[in-house]
Image: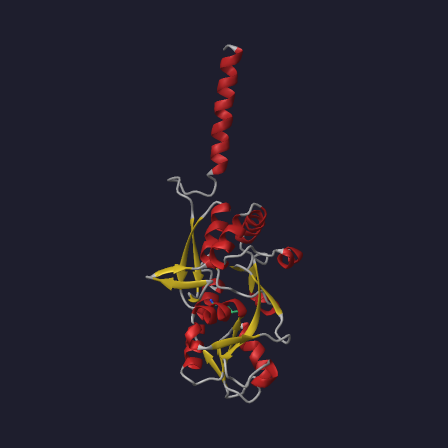
């Protein structure tokens, strides 16, 4: 065989090998593996339903991350408590639901590196006498059951306090406040800030208080999932290459400040 011909054969073999590597995550038919990602789509702007479709910052984010890691992703609304049941039972590959990384949760689940900075805040009517977390003491407070907002409010009011009303999703907590059945809602700042901004006629305001800790969201995985390492790598990549900023900008109309998130990674 002539030297140049041999080179062509070697290159072809090399290219074939390369493409075989590239499709290692695909099924036999060449399709990428589709991950089943679960959420509680009642937490705009992170995840909510629009004409039967699950949309939001988290949805765009997790799809971009999955794609970077070589997967397709289908995000399915299952509800908040079921998110944890599914991940624990490994019936879903991952969950994205504005989920705060906590030490307690880390005992039962794995988390990706942090991707969003958050804190709990208080939502009240404009004319409310409540001006701080301390003012919540003898008031009726609505929260989403099983959230960090619930835990933080339990610390303020006492876990057994009847004035603490727990709902299955955060929209129900907001409805309780609107209907006058509660004096305040405690939930993630971005969610209530967006709500108040988008519903100016409802006359609510958001109060911040230093008792509420800084929190970071992570993607949730079953313990020891091999996806964690792949997603971590992909998340860092998207934060470096501007893709994360693009998605952030689409939903929040400003550039992200990644200082605190990078400090955590
Ligand atoms: N960040 C809070 C937590 O992890 C609330 C998240 C609620 N998310 C939702 N999709 N309802 O506890």
- Of 162 and 120, the residue lying toward us: 120
Q: Is residue 158 visible?
A: no
Q: Is residue 189 left or right of residue 71?
A: right
Q: How many marks?
A: 0
Q: Quadrant of the C terminus?
A: bottom right
The residue located at (48%, 60%) in the rendering is: 96
Q: Residue furthest top?
A: 2
Q: Is residue 261 visible?
A: yes
Residue 39 sits in quarter: bottom left
Where does the image place residue 157, in percent across and percent down from the top left? 57, 85
User: Is residue 144 depicted above or below 244 in this figure?
Assistant: below
- Of 129 and 178, the residue lying toward us: 129
- Of 195 and 98, the residue lying toward us: 195
The residue located at (52%, 48%) in the rendering is: 243
Q: Is residue 52 left or right of residue 226?
A: left
Q: Residue furthest left?
A: 51
Residue 156 sits in quarter: bottom right
Name the image colouring. secondary structure
Where does the image place residue 16, in percent across and percent down from the top left? 47, 29
User: Is residue 140 depicted above or below 52 in this figure?
Assistant: below
Where does the image place residue 186, in percent across and percent down from the top left? 52, 76
The residue located at (56%, 66%) in the rendering is: 100
Where does the image place residue 150, in percent across and percent down from the top left? 53, 77
């Amino acid at each position: 065989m002539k030297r140049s011909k041999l080179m062509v054969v070697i290159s072809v073999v090399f290219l074939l090998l390369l493409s075989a590597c590239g499709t290692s995550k695909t099924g036999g038919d060449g399709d990428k593996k589709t991950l089943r990602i679960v959420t509680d789509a009642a937490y705009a702007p992170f995840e909510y339903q629009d004409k039967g479709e699950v949309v939001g910052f988290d949805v765009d984010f997790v799809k971009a991350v999955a794609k970077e890691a070589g997967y397709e992703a289908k995000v399915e609304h299952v509800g908040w408590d079921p998110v944890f049941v599914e991940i624990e039972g490994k019936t879903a590959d991952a969950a994205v639901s504005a989920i705060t990384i906590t030490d307690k949760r880390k005992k039962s689940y794995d988390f990706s590196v942090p991707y969003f900075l958050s804190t709990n805040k208080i939502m009240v009517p404009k004319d409310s006498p409540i001006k701080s977390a301390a003012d919540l003491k003898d008031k009726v407070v609505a929260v989403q059951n099983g959230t960090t907002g619930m835990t933080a409010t339990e610390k303020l009011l006492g876990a057994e306090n009847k004035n603490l009303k727990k709902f299955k999703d955060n929209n129900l907590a907001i409805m309780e406040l609107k209907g006058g059945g509660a004096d305040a809602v405690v939930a993630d700042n971005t969610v209530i800030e967006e709500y108040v901004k988008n519903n100016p006629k409802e006359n609510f305001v958001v109060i911040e208080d230093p008792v509420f800790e800084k929190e970071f969201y992570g993607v949730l995985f079953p313990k020891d999932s091999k996806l964690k390492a792949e997603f971590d790598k992909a998340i860092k990549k998207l934060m470096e290459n501007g893709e994360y900023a693009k998605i952030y900008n689409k939903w929040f109309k400003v550039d992200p400040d990644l200082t605190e998130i990078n400090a955590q990674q």
